[in-house]
Amino acid sequence: MALLLERIVVRYRGAGATGGDHVAVREVSLGLAAGEIGVLVGPSGCGKTSLLRAVAGLEPLAGGVIRLAGDVVSDAHRHLHRPAELRRVGMVFQDYALFPHLDVAGNVGFGLRQLGRAERTQRVAEMLELVGLPGEAGKMPHQLSGGQQQRVALARALAPAPRLLLLDEAFSALDVELRERLAHEVRAILKVSGTAALVVTHDQMEAFALADRLGVMNDGHLEQWDRPYDLYHRPATRFVADFVGHGVLAPARIVATSQGPRVDTPLGLLADAAECPLPDAYPGGECLVLLRADDIEHDDAAPVRARIRRRDFRGAEFLYTLELADGLEVLAHVPSHHDHAPGEWIGIRPRVEHVVTFPR
């Protein structure tokens, strides 16, 4: 494994509201294979940056073990803490942190001073080719766009061949379109270089674009660490279901039918409930079912009607906030040529391929 965290704890002394200790990371365990990209998301203050800083060696552990490529670099039980500069970890920050007095080549080659001049020049050229800036070696940072500066920062972090790359909100200072494009480019660059990476971001679209493994943190806990597809379609906790994507948890009841258990919802019986638990999984079969915006289709021939409370135009689609006759609100992604005004009643039907339920 490129990175293995075993029940790590990060505690800040005297940082609480009353001057007591504040536990920022609570027994988090996760693993990243060589060449994998892991991404952490979560609300502000959930502990994701503290976890990243602990991996980098910038924060000591109050508990647990950190291994990089099988090498123990932090062990709270043995009071082992290898300094950041000895961990062979690269870091890319939000503000690029380029040296303004050095040109692009000087920035990229800054961590290669142990190499001879010819070898260093060759490595810098390789890195600039990798990040798509082969002709920019002689430019100063202020002559580059924000996206180019971030690529230089990435090249500088990759140049010493780190065992792991850490990115902390690395694209958040860029505009939305550039951020999304750069996220795809960085993923391709990391895959070509074979470098494992752990990324912190607040942008879920960026997270899905980058991640092989995606983690959701909440109050210092890692709620789920999974493939992005599974995390979205099979959230392990109510917090993950609420936090990731658009959707609601609707009251429902699991019932037995001749075709097996089905989920009876305000939108009717879910047609395909192969993943449905048995009716006795919850008292009386009563539960909450996750209805994502992409689980609900606009169909004026459907028997269920809903009133449009709000619509958010997103170019190719609307995100409709809908209210059923009983007052339940649901969300639906609808193609933008289905142009209905707030207050209109439209027909909707469920199309749920992954049944996810939680206790009431």
Image (spheres, rainbow, N blue to C red):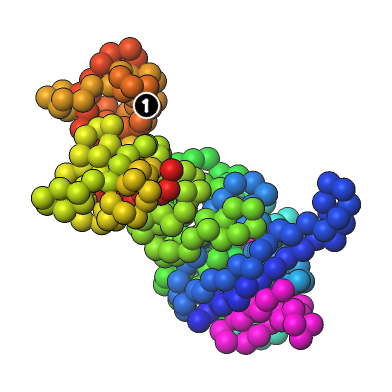
- Percent across and percent down for residue 92 are 62, 61
The image quarter containing residue 270 is top left
Residue 108 appearing in the image? no
- Percent across and percent down for residue 165 are 58, 70
The image quarter containing residue 119 is bottom right
Question: Which residue ends up furthest to the top in the rendered image?
Answer: 343
Indicate yes or no whether the magenta region holds residue 170: no
- Taking 255 as reference, is 100 left or right? right
The image quarter containing residue 327 is top left
Residue 225 appearing in the image? yes
Task: Say what amino acid the circle numbered 1 marks.
Answer: Leu
Count neighbours of disc 1 (C-alpha within 10 A) and say few if under 14, some if 14 to 19, many if 20 or more.
Answer: few
- Percent across and percent down for residue 48 are 62, 57
Q: Secondary structure at mark 1?
A: loop
| Residue at left offset 34%, top offset 50% | 356
| Residue at left offset 61%, top offset 81% | 67
Give above or below for 192 relative to 12: below
The residue carrying mark 1 is: 328
Give above or below for 315 relative to 165: above
Q: Which residues lie in the magenta part?
A: 63-92
Q: Nearer the viewer, residue 233 or 58?
A: 233
Give above or below for 320 relative to 204: above
| Residue at left offset 45%, top offset 71% | 36
| Residue at left offset 56%, top offset 84% | 69
Indicate yes or no whether the magenta region holds residue 82: yes
- Taking 74 as reference, is 187 left or right? left
Q: Quadrant of the C terminus?
A: top left
- Percent across and percent down for residue 76 are 74, 79
Q: Nearer the viewer, residue 324 or 233?
A: 324
